Amino acid sequence: MDFLKKVKVLAGKDLKLEFRTKEMLSSMLVFSFIVIVVFGFVFDPVGQDLDELFPGIIWVAFIFSGILCLNRSFIAEKENNSLQGLLLCPGDSSIIYFGKLIANLVLMLIMEVISLPLFIVLFDYSLAGSLLQLAAVLFLGSLGFISIGTFLAALTANTKSSEILLPVILFPIIVPVIIGAVEATGVVLTAGDSAELRAWLKLLVVYDLIFIVVPFMLFEFLLEV
Amino acid sequence: MDSDNKLEFILVWLTFLVTSLAIYMVFIYAPTERVMGDVQRLFYFHVATAWIAFAAFFVVFIASIVYLKNQSSLANILGLASAEIGVLFTTMVLITGPLWARPIWNAWWTWDPRLTTTLILWFIYIAYILIRISAEESEKRGRLAAVFGIVGFINVPIVFMSIRWWRSIHPQVVSGGSFDLDPRMLHALLTSVAAFTLIYLYLLQKRFKVELLQEKLKDIKETLRKQKHI
């Protein structure tokens, strides 16, 4: 119980800081918006093409703007040595991991919920599937991306060129999430085969579980000073 | 000649002999494939380098676990050396593959699970080396790289599964069909695998020596700097 409470405090601290300035959230939103507009120019998708491209386009936008948020999450703590302070707090160091994970996940989900309707309007896309299923896919996909992303952001925060390094080391690792999330979104949006959807959701759940447990076990090695 | 140099001497000659034998087996001893012709001979090098590359990454994984457990500097160097050679061999796999595929499949590349996983594997271990380069202190460098070595290795089977599902839903361009090997072809393949294993071991021990010498050099520099200050 104590563990959960500490995680809540840490995540709350990050979110409070964010909501005071809304610095990160606004740049994430604008960036995902820009990525989508660029895709609009380069593909000019209509009709049949749109059904095939739309899931991929939205996930690329989400993941690109998610990288912004991940990049800041540990670098920001390095100013004034606040990371040192966090480490001095009583309790397991994985509390920091879960606190950051939840804060990043909340920001990512807020960004998705605001920008998705915008994308649908922009591309004049007609939703066929159920919203509940779509929410499940968005949540599981974002969780997988953020759980390993937060972990690798902590890893790169210790290096010289962290902002450059993070995307390079993160993208090969999240290949299964990208495939699973894009395919599942495609099935949901076109109200496709539910057995297929279940298979992709299973992949996402397994990935999420593995990449929450593995960072949980290895996180202490990242922050040792 | 001390025992260390003797070992290297034996290894060098063994590598030389077995590699020469492998070249003979591949180009002269093994029969020409009926359908594919001489291009098929790439297969012996391709498969052998692929196996050694995967083995090298398994060594990285084990070395990473050992390093996180007891901070042994040997495990640290082993991880680095093995990852570098693994990237080299994977690069060879990725070059020989398309060379063979172009005349046979009529395409340089297909998004087949095995091909794509190998490519992702290559990216993961390049990332591993990048982490090594960009961390500042050597102790931290080893630790961060070891953590990534474990995460990267765990990820590989998931990547493979996810790409397989993805491909099975999309139209299959090339099925992985198996073919019966002539025993002479099998001999050539096994010799080639032995040759590449020896090359791997030889490069590994060379890399080990270089790394140890570098550490020694750093120590000497450190001592000199201290003496200057006194």
Image (cartoon, coloured by chain):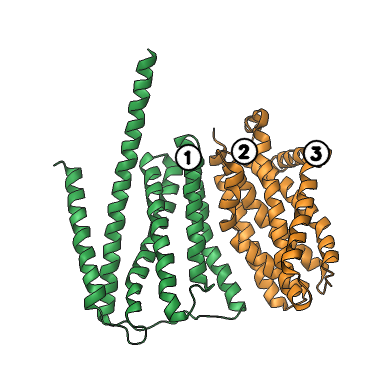
Chain colours: A orange, B green
Check disc 2: other Cα within 10 Å, few if <14, some if 14-19, many if 20+. Answer: few
Q: Is residue B173 visible?
A: yes
Check disc 1: other Cα within 10 Å, few if <14, some if 14-19, many if 20+. Answer: some
Which percent across, then down, holds residue A168? 57, 52
Q: In the rendered view, does B49 fall on the left or right side of A224? A: left
Q: Which residue appears farthest toward the front when viewing the image?
A: A41
Q: Which residue is mark 2?
A: A92
Q: From the viewer's perspective, is the residue at label 2 or at label 1 nearer?
A: 1
Q: Residue at x 38, y 60 (%)?
A: B89
Alpha-carbon distance for marks 1 and 3? 34 Å
Where B10 falls versus A225 (above or below)? Answer: below
Q: Which residue is mark 1?
A: B141
The quadrant of the picture occupied by the C terminus of chain A is top right
Q: Which residue appears farthest toward the top when viewing the image?
A: B230
Q: Amino acid at mark 2?
A: Asp
Where B193 falls versus B70 (above or below)? Answer: below
Alpha-carbon distance for marks 2 and 3? 23 Å
